[in-house]
Image (spheres, rainbow, N blue to C red):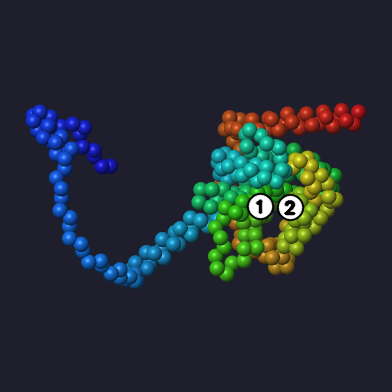
Amino acid sequence: MIALPPAARSQGSSEAVDALGLVLANPPALPHPPALPQAKTVLVPPDDAERRDIDLTERLQLRCREPKFSVARTLGEVIEAWGLLYETYRDVNFISPNHFKVHTVPQAIGSHTAVVRCRVGRTTVGTISSICDTPLGLPLDEVYGPELEVLRGQGRRLTEIGLLAERSELLPPPRGGEDPSTGGLMLDLLRYAFYFAVFSNATDIVCGIPPRRARLYQRAMGFEPIGEIKSYSTVEDNPVVLLRAELRHVFRDAHLYRMTDYFARNPVRHDEFKARYLFDNHRLVQSPLAGYLRRKQDLERHKARQRQTVAA
């Protein structure tokens, strides 16, 4: 830090002050310096050491802008991810606004869930949640309960992937030679979601997605539809279709599908999931997420009463 001079020093005599004021009011004229000949600009190419420094700086800048994928380890990271989900779903009118500015489902709260996030620098640009089945059921039980019960009756251990959001416009532009249509952000979010299912010893992955994306999931990951298109109240009654992928077959035949082939060649270490946020009850109760969930449950009860009234 640069030290500032004292506000005032010795005052001196009044005559000195008057003389100083006179000089400041009438500064003496200074002679103009002689014109100097204009120097020619000479561009000197950087030497090898300077070039190495420039390359290193560019690599560091690119690294700061490259997407980084991880599993949320704190409540704050979870809320940040589900805050992005809220913004993305609001943009497409999948949900109604709430003053907590987060979106999730009650079945996702617990140690059986891994919240995956993608960051560019300090900004979260993508998220997905992988939710293992529990006695409370899965989010999709609301609309596909009978179909999921059939799988459970067959002894299948289910994991649902969902709560997917991405803001690709916040990503850096693709580098030379890269195909901007490969969906790299969603690719790695799904890779993490698949491997949490493997980590949790699931046999099947299920998801409910907009029908227009079903062909991509079938063609690139080996999913199959096991239910009719239905309206889903969690996303403002927008249409969804239930898809299922058997993990044993997915990884056995990974080479047949573009995305699962990438998954098989790029596994996620189990340590990533061991360090996930486990939804500590004490901290959770004191967070905005608890207020949001209470409000969501109140709204669901209100909607249920309305449906009963209409039916009567």
Q: Quadrant of residue 104?
A: top right
Q: Nearer the viewer, residue 63 or 58?
A: 58
Q: Position of residue 177 (x, y in %)?
A: 57, 69
- Against 173, residue 301 (above or below) is above
Q: Nearer the viewer, residue 231 or 225?
A: 231
The circle drawn on residue 119 is none
Whole-number angstrom distance, CA of label 1 to CA of label 2: 9 Å
Q: Which residue is mark 1?
A: 193
Q: Position of residue 96 (x, y in %)?
A: 71, 37
The circle drawn on residue 205 is 2
Quadrant housing the N terminus: top left
Could you tell whether 224 is left or right of 198 in the image?
right
> Which residue shows up at 69% across the image and 65% down it?
258
Q: Position of residue 136 (x, y in %)?
A: 74, 38
Pointers 1 and 2 in contact (CB under 8 A)? yes
- Label 2, residues with CA under 10 Å away: few <14, some 14-19, many ≥20: many
- Label 1, residues with CA under 10 Å away: few <14, some 14-19, many ≥20: many
Q: Quadrant of residue 188?
A: bottom right
Q: Quadrant of residue 5?
A: top left
- Against 150, residue 58 (above or below) is below
> Which residue shows up at 57% across the image and 55% down it?
171
Q: Nearer the viewer, residue 42 or 132?
A: 42
Judge whether residue 147 can be spotted in this image: yes
Q: Give, as a three-letter code, the residue at label 1.
A: Ala
